[in-house]
Amino acid sequence: MTKPYKSEPAVVNGIVAAAAAVIALLVAFGLDLDDTQQAAILGVVAVLAPIVAAIVTRSKVTPVNRP
């Protein structure tokens, strides 16, 4: 069974979408964030998600000798 972060680059998009959903949920339950703050948080998540995915993926890759 393959791991999703090895074969699916869409995992990064899922992380960003999950963050957007969590922010929307928190705002719906009363967290006082304006649109600018929400955009800033999502911007940071959009930058960090690929970095985290790359670090996790890189730690799972086995180097192969080139022919």
Image: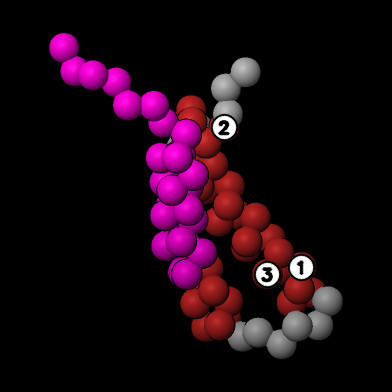
Marks 2 and 1, how far apart at CA: 26 Å
Could you tell me which quadrant the N terminus lies in?
Answer: top right
Residue at 42%, 54% in the rendered image = 51
Of marks 2 and 3, which one's residue comes earlier in the chain?
2
For disc 2, the neighbor class at 10 Å (few under 14, some 14 to 19, many from 20) is: few
Query: How many discs appear?
Result: 3
Please provide the residue range marked out in magenta: 43-67
31 lies left or right of 67:
right
Residue type of the residue flagged with mark 3:
Ile
Label placed on residue 23: 3
Q: Residues under labels 3 and 1: Cα distance?
A: 5 Å
Q: Is residue 10 above or below residue 7?
A: below
**Nearer-N-terminus badge (2/1):** 2
Label 3 environment density (alpha carbons within 10 Å; few <14, some 14–19, many ≥20): some
- Residue 65, disc: none
What whole-number distance in Å separates the C-alpha atoms at marks 2 and 3?
24 Å
Please give the residue where the numbered disc 2 appears in the rendered image.
Answer: 4
